[in-house]
Image (spheres, rainbow, N blue to C red):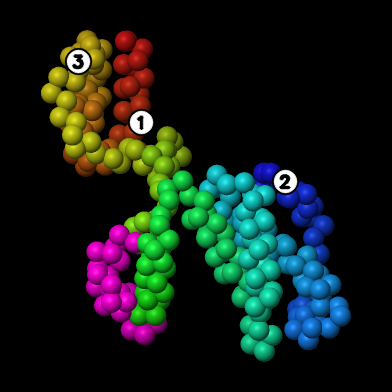
Amino acid sequence: MYVNKVEICGVNTSQLPVLKNEEMRRLFTQIQSHTEDAAAAREKLIQGNLRLVLSVIQRFHNRGESMDDLFQVGCIGLMKAIDNFDLSQNVRFSTYAVPMVIGEIRRYLRDNNVIRVSRSLRDIAYKSLQAREHLLLKNGKEPSVEQIAEELDIPREEIVFALDSIQEPVSLFESVYNDGGDPIMVMDQVCDEKSSGENWLEDINLTEAVNRLNERERYIIDLRFFKGRTQMEVAEEIGISQAQVSRLEKAALKQLRKYV
């Protein structure tokens, strides 16, 4: 299923019903009164809020996950929101339901991540996030890791390790900047500290090809691959933008491939 199609999990999203607020309150009243029509009212509420689930999963369309799977997980969050919604609170159902749906999807993404994190570590991370929110509301400013550790009576190192463990990995090929030309990727920002490369050019027999480049291109190739500098560092050293470094580097590599 692709985002620009209207059918998901066999449901034609263009034909999904939309409930007015008054109708939703009437249905919630039936559900919470446990009348004979409670099950039918619950089903109608679910159907009437599938558009809400659809709007939420659009935020996750670039995660590489099946949109059908995310839609089904989002529906679980929707049903939990319906079952736990307090009609006496002066809050619109959508305001209550959206965080529930998002939370359910995020749990699914975390639990199905290729990098497995132990349950105990995740528990510490979630407690840390809750403590952060509590301290933020209490003090009106972002708490430090030390304050969170003190609040939970957990060593600072465990807090840092737990929070790091639930961070999503980033692809080396993820674009971090694009000025309309060639995108700059994460891998372009990575510095190879171990790449001393004293005999790099000789080792791969590129000396003659490199000598065919102009002076600026040779200098960029030398800094990037001989000295292991990042594109940002090269840009600062020669006084041009990182996007220009990226374009010159790609042009130089293209020339090298031609000569080799």
Q: For the residues labelled 1 and 2, say whether their Cβ atoms are less than 8 Å apart.
A: no
- Magenta stretch mostly in which secondary structure? helix
Q: Nearer the viewer, residue 259 or 103?
A: 103
Q: Label 2: few (<14), some or many (≥20) within 10 Å?
A: few
Q: Nearer the viewer, residue 182 or 96?
A: 96
Residue 4 horizontal/vertical position (percent): 69, 46
Whether the magenta-drawn stretch holds residue 142 is answered as yes
Toward the bottom, the furthest residue is 88
Q: Which mark is residue 203?
A: 3
Q: Label 1: few (<14), some or many (≥20) within 10 Å?
A: some
Residue 192 horizontal/vertical position (percent): 23, 36
Mark nearer the N terminus (1 vs 2): 2
Q: Which mark is residue 247?
A: 1
User: Where does the C terminus fall, quadrant-wise?
Assistant: top left
Asked where in the image residue 99 lies, by quadrant, the reply is bottom right
Q: For the residues labelled 1 and 3, say whether their Cβ atoms are less than 8 Å apart.
A: no
Tag count? 3
